[in-house]
Image: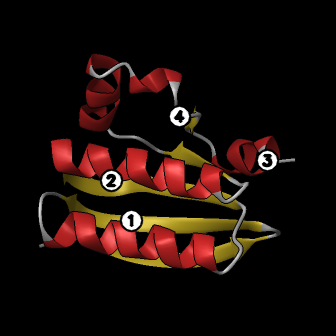
Amino acid sequence: MSVKLTTRQVGDVTVIDANGRITLGEGSATFRDKIKELAGSGAKKVLVNMAEITYIDSSGIGELVSGFTTVTGAGGSLKLLNLGKRVQDLLQITKLYTVFETFDDEAAAIRSFS
């Protein structure tokens, strides 16, 4: 199963609830397209909720970085919520934990945008 993405608004923050696998192929393309769509529509505050991500590979990590670049390039910010152990480990190994702001609490993550 590839990734399923649903979006919702919490105030002026766009929350992407990701469910499934972000892997090479369809999963990463779906994620990339959603980020581009949001950035193109003017979303400046994007929070990716990864609580339901069951697996992510290096391609998926690459898409997170690409999404971060796309949103910040459009004058916004992208932050991560509810990372599983594998995602945390991958961010640690790749030193990307210094790039992404990560949160375990949605309310705190929403507040961090203001």
Mark 1 vs 4, N-terminal side = 1
Q: Earlier in the sequence, mark 2 or mark 1?
A: 1
For residue 52, above or below residue 2: above
Task: Judge by depth and name the residue closer to the eye, 53 or 47.
Answer: 47
Q: Which residue is mark 2?
A: 63
Query: Looking at this view, is 70 or 114 the one in front?
Result: 70
Residue indicated by mark 4: 100
Q: Which numbered disc flags the more N-terminal residue, 3 or 1?
A: 1
Give the quadrant of residue 57.
top left
Q: Give the CA separation, mark 2 to mark 1.
A: 13 Å
Mark nearer the N terminus (4 vs 3): 4
Nearest to N terminus: mark 4 or mark 2: 2
Q: What residue is disc 1 on?
A: 18
> SS of the residue at dot 1?
strand
CB under 8 Å between callouts 3 and 1? no
Where residue 13 sits in the image (x, y, percent)?
Answer: 73, 64
Give the CA separation, mark 3 to mark 1.
Answer: 20 Å
Answer yes or no: is residue 2 visible. no
Residue carrying label 3: 113
- Secondary structure type for disc 3: loop
